[in-house]
Amino acid sequence: MEENKKPSDGTFQQQRLRAWQPLLTPPWVSCMFGFVFILFIILGSAIITASKSVVDAKVRYDNQPQCKNSSLCYVSLTVPKQMKPPVFFYYELTNFNQNHRRYVKSRADSQLRGVNVHSGLSSCDPLITWNSTTLYPCGVIANSFFNDTFLGALCRSGQPNCTAFVNDSQWSEHDIAWPTDKTVKIQRSKSTGTYQYWSRWISITECNK
């Protein structure tokens, strides 16, 4: 006996559901624009208030005379008003195009995984060798890094001495990188040359205004 494949006589099966189509009349359009206007005014005011509450202070030190020919220099940074914790310390690099095609290609993934490879390193161009010695790891990515070291101290106005940031409760390096920025692939097991390490002592002056 052939099975009956006819759908049941229901509203959903027979596509007899009621439909509703909005009519964009002038009153409806005016109300919608008015609601969006008020909503955006509230959100914009909240964002502007939060943005203005951020205290930002910056100083450039590479052009300071005391920092050009010395491995240790002192830089003073004046904070215009009270900062609420936590206070974040960042460094800024300019003219560093890490997304450039030649920069991104200049690496050897096998070496970065810890494999001892000294041949077939054309992908590392232009930094394959140094003084006739094969670099390990080779490439521009592995051999270009920011090595300044920062120390901090708080100098309050009206007080002769400064308080140095020494422990994790005052100056912490934990949880400063996003999980997406962390990688276990890159391993630097051998030195590729002699580098000069620079120390920057940042003196933070609190200004009571």
Image: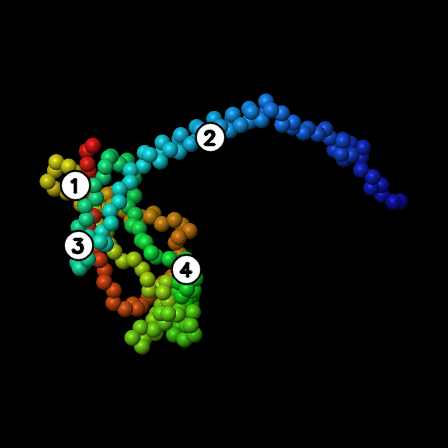
- First along the sequence among labels 4 and 1: 4
Please name the residue that numbered disc 2 is placed on.
Answer: 40
| Inter-mark Cα distance, 4 to 1 | 41 Å
**In this view, 28 is above or below 97:** above
Q: Residues within 10 Å of mark 3 (few under 14, many from 20)?
A: few
Label 4's element? Answer: loop
**In this view, 201 is above or below 16:** below
Please name the residue that numbered disc 3 is placed on.
Answer: 65
In the image, 41: left or right of 83? Answer: right
- First along the sequence among labels 3 and 2: 2
Q: Say which residue appears at 72% left-offset and 28% top-offset.
A: 18
**Residue that lies at the very extreme toward the front in this rendered image:** 26
Label 3's element? Answer: helix
Residue in the foreground of this view, choosing between 80 and 14: 80
**Mark 4 or mark 1, whichever is nearer to me:** 4
Q: Are marks 3 and 1 in contact (CB under 8 Å)?
A: no
**In this view, 179 is above or below 129:** above
Q: Residue 100 shows which numbered tag?
A: 4
- First along the sequence among labels 2 and 4: 2
Q: Are marks 1 and 2 in contact (CB under 8 Å)?
A: no
Q: Say which residue appears at 85% left-offset and 43% top-offset.
A: 3
**In this view, 76 is above or below 8:** below
Please name the residue that numbered disc 1 is placed on.
Answer: 155
| Inter-mark Cα distance, 3 to 2 | 49 Å
Residue 15 in the image: state x and y as whole percent: 76, 34
Residue in the foreground of this view, choosing between 97 and 9: 97
Q: Say which residue appears at 12% left-offset and 42% top-offset.
A: 161
Q: Say which residue appears at 51% left-offset and 29% top-offset.
A: 36
Q: Residues within 10 Å of mark 1 (few under 14, many from 20)?
A: many
Residue in the foreground of this view, choosing between 15 and 102: 102
Q: Are marks 3 and 2 in contact (CB under 8 Å)?
A: no
**Residue that lies at the very extreme toward the top in this rendered image:** 27
